[in-house]
Image (spheres, rainbow, N blue to C red):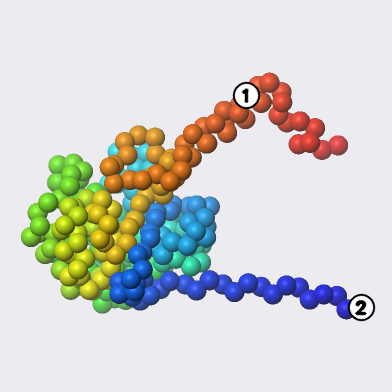
Amino acid sequence: MAANPPPPTPPRPSRITVPKFAALKGSGRKISMVTAYDYAFARLVDEAGVEGVLVGDSMSMVVQGHENTLPVTLDEMIYHAEMVGRAVERALVIVDMPFPSYHLGKYKAIDNAGRILKEARCQAVKLEGGAEQAETIAALVSAGIPVMAHCGLRPQSVHQLGGYKVQRDEASLIEDARAAADAGAFAMVLECIPSRIARRITEAAPIPTIGIGAGGDCDGQVLVLHDVLGLTSDYVPRFVKSYADLHATVVGAVRQFRDEVRSGAFPSAEHGYE
């Protein structure tokens, strides 16, 4: 009797490209995006079906333990982005350009963004700024590098802004959003701005707006994965919603392991070899 043929290999999921991501603006479907910084978590969030995975410079705080996003380097961003890109098969992978990798002129910005696309498995970069970065955004796009802009609260400018504050200058915010879209950005993050301003920007912008602390009228939402999972142990911003309490789960599991090692309950016979 002939052997049964092996089961067919399941088809690879269809990749969300930059044009597909941008086209979600008019689809009526909200866009979900979360951060990831390593292979294991990136596989899980991709399996969950989010449209975008951001390798954020928030890694400086949630992974490296710094007080802000400024210390993380370009080499570190590329190192983590390569891990994430190797794991993600479906979502669009966007990588933050860290400070000051795009502040040294448009040619240096192209060089640094080119390194990210060449060395990491990603499809786009993100940079903070609107009107003041329009020339850089346009130069990157002209070089074939897709750009997601970031307007409103800009964590890399925390010292200039005087802290992590809600941005309320409506005229400036609208100007930044318009400039980013006109320069060729395919989407923009709106962070910590009043909902009514985010609504106005979203209605006028030809590209998707991804909110974080910008209300529910944006075309999508992004959160830091560690906040989503309840792994953040210090200050949590008002706009964050935790969907799990993995902090308690992890501490409890490790504590149980510790106790079983101390008591001799682990390892038992079933965990050993004869």
Residue at horizontal 43%, vertical 53%? 36
Q: The disc labelled 1 sits on which kind of residue?
A: Asp
| Coordinates of residue 216 in the picture (x, y in percent) | 27, 57
Q: Tag 2, which secondary structure?
A: loop
> Is residue 248 shown above or below 181?
above
Which residue is label 2 attached to? 1
Q: The disc labelled 2 sits on which kind of residue?
A: Met
Of mark 1 and mark 2, the one earlier in the sequence is: 2
| Coordinates of residue 253 in the picture (x, y in percent) | 57, 33
Observer-side mark, 1 or 2, equals: 2
Side of 254 relative to 103 (left or right): right
Mark sitting on residue 259: 1
Residue at horizontal 35%, vertical 65%? 30
| Coordinates of residue 144 in the picture (x, y in percent) | 32, 76
Side of 160 relative to 70 (left or right): left
Side of 266 relative to 41 (left or right): right
Residue at horizontal 69%, vertical 75%? 8
- Viewport quadrant of the C terminus: top right
Q: Can the viewer see residue 191?
A: no
| Coordinates of residue 233 in the picture (x, y in percent) | 39, 35
Q: Tag 1, which secondary structure?
A: helix
Task: Report the front residue among 83 and 17.
Answer: 17
